Image: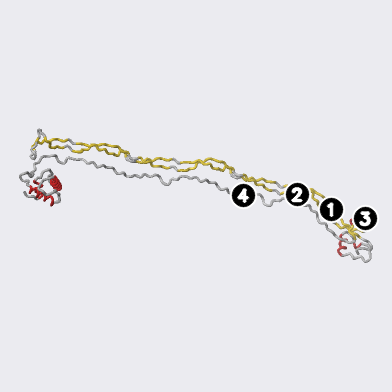
Amino acid sequence: MTSLDRGAAPASHELLTAAKNGGIDLDGATPGMCYHEHYMPAKYEYEDETVLVKGAYETVSVSKPEYRMVEKQVLVKEASKVLKTVPAQYSTETEQLIDVAAHTIWKKGTGPIQKIDEATGEIMCLVEVPATYKTVSRRVLASPAMTQEIDVPAVYKTVQVRELVSGAQETRNEVPAAYDTVKVKKQVSDVAFVWHEVHNKEHPAATRTGNKICLTEKAAVYETVTSTVVDTPASSHRVEVPAVYKTVEVSKLVSQAQEVREEIPAEYNTVVSQELETEGFMEWRSILCKTNMTASTVADIQRALMQREYNPGVIDGVIGLDTIGAMNAFQRDNSLPVDKYINMETVKALGVDL
């Protein structure tokens, strides 16, 4: 029963088991004895304990790369060779050429060499005429045109270039774990329920649980400690910085200089000169005279010239300038002796009968 009062509720099996486990000899109890249950709380003690506040970790620092500006020579134009044209050199030469060759002519006069002109009856002298000359200038080649090979040195340009002195550096620093000392409440003894006879004053009345035996459990008390843990360890990664280029215009040799020879033809000047083919000489020719030169004969000669398309002028039987001109033209065209007289060889060539 839960009490000595009438109508009290019977004690449950669990309650009786708890009393028995609490040290009550239920079999040895006598009627009318009451037992009550005392609650004995758990006992705790405080101890110093080192707890992790912040785990060990690494710090990573990356230093920037160092550069310096330097001057560098950049090839702008390659070394090459050029050909320089040296023009031909000329000199002027003069030369005397015979204009009219030396010859002899007959002139009127007297002298040791003389003849009597049968046509006029005059005395003729043979005279030497010296040769005449003329000076001709001409340009002759002194030295031919040529080429000279000249070396052209390479051309460089000084430019400012940023040069890497030292690359980016990674520095890792080990940071040790951080700990803190805290007071930790540790349980020395568990909660206990002790049963005593109601008249036993060993435990204060305040610890009594009442007639209703109940077993209670008090949850442990915890202190919340905030700690920083490493979620992702520190790391570094390399970032590729591309090289910086500067466009510099340069002249690149495509082909070497070549020598081109151009033939300049020689220049000539036409010089007319007279050369003596045959020496002058005297010859006797048969000509028309007053005895056989009648007007009828002259008219026949004029007609013969007209038939051969040599214009003697008016056919009048008189030897005038037109007749002599036509006759001389006929003589030259037929390789006949040419003079101011009508020679018999020309009369025969014209087919005129005397």
Mark 3 or 4, nearer chain start: 3
- Residue 118, by quadrant, is top left
Question: What is the crowding at mark 1: few (fewer than 14 residues within 10 Å), some, or many (at least 20)?
Answer: few
Between 71 and 189, the one lying in front of the other is: 71
Q: Cα distance, mark 2 to mark 1?
A: 23 Å
Q: Indicate which disc, 2 or 1, sits on the residue closer to the N terminus.
A: 1
Q: In the shown orientation, is residue 46 left or right of residue 301?
A: right
Rendered residue at 11%/35% (across/down): 108
Disc 3 to disc 1, how far (Cα)? 21 Å
Alpha-carbon neighbours of circle 3 within 10 Å: few (<14), some, or many (≥20)? few
In the depicted structure, whether residue 117 falls above or below residue 307:
above
Mark 4 vs mark 1: in front: 4
Compared across the picture, whether 131 is left or right of 63 comes to left
Amino acid type of the residue that numbered disc 4 sits on in the rendered structure: His
Give, as a three-letter code, the residue at label 1.
Lys
Residue for badge 2: 51
Q: Residues within 10 Å of mark 4 (few under 14, many from 20)?
A: few
Where residue 79 appears, as percent x and y from the top left, is 44, 42
**Does residue 155 appear to the left or right of 177 in the view shown?**
left
Residues at badges 2 and 1 in contact (C-beta under 8 Å)?
no
Inspect the image, locate mark 3, and give the three-letter code of the amino acid beneath it: Lys
Q: Which residue is mark 4?
A: 237
Q: Nearer the viewer, mark 3 or mark 2?
A: 2
Q: Residue at x 23, y 41 (%)?
A: 271
Asked which secondary structure carries label 1, the reply is strand
Q: Which residue carries the number 3 mark?
A: 201
Q: Would residue 334 be visible to someone looking at this image?
A: no
Q: Position of residue 153 (x, y in %)?
A: 44, 40
| Residue beneath disc 1 | 43
Mark closest to the chain's N terminus, 3 or 1: 1
Extreme residue toward the left, this view:
291
